[in-house]
Amino acid sequence: MKRTGLCPVFLKQTRIGKNEKEFKMYKFRSMITNAEEKLNELLKYNEASGAMFKMKNDPRITRIGRFIRKTSIDELPQLLNVLRGEMSLVGPRPPLPREVKDYSSYDKQRLLVTPGCTGLWQVSGRSNIGFDEMVQLDIKYIKSRSIRNDIIIILKTFKLLIGSKDAF
């Protein structure tokens, strides 16, 4: 029996990790199944600078998707990526291949370490921060990495999750 109209609960998406190595990152699906095909139509509404796309009222996000993004529940399956060694709990977020194509050599410094589920960028403003500032925060994190700083970022992440603002 063929199902129609249902989208898979999980999204497996190609991301770029440490040393520009591709891996499949897992998330709970928050967008319609053909979201990537619809992206070209929406690029003119991009609210982010640099090599990333952000749009506050992105029409590709489902009703449930808005909730799971706001609460970051969509990120929980990435714990599988952590167990597999492809990601760590804290580090720069892993970018999409199409984003890395637009990276400068300065931007590529983000790819020198294992990407994380949360990071300095997320606890410093998340969706309200542009690409250049995100790169600067990631490089600052990389240069000052320590268990103490990771614990601080994890605690700040939990605080943000309870407030669940700044995510889109």
Image: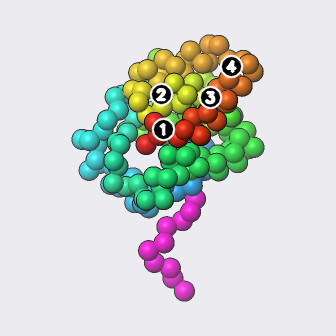
- Give the colour scheme of this rendering: rainbow
- Left or right, 48 with respect to 160, comes to left
* Amino acid on which disc 3 is placed: Lys
Q: Residue at x 50, y 48 (%)?
A: 69
Towards the viewer: 54 or 11: 54
Badge 1 or badge 3: first in the primary sequence:
3
* Amino acid on which disc 1 is placed: Lys
Q: Residue at x 43, y 59 (%)?
A: 63
Marks 1 and 4, how far apart at CA: 22 Å
Badge 2 or badge 1: first in the primary sequence:
2
Asked if marks 1 and 4 touch (Cβ < 8 Å), the reply is: no
Marks 4 and 2, how far apart at CA: 17 Å
Residue at which label 3 appears: 156
Residue at which label 2 appears: 125
* Amino acid on which disc 4 is placed: Asn
Q: Is residue 14 visible?
A: no
Marks 4 and 3, how far apart at CA: 10 Å
Most extreme residue toward the bottom is 1
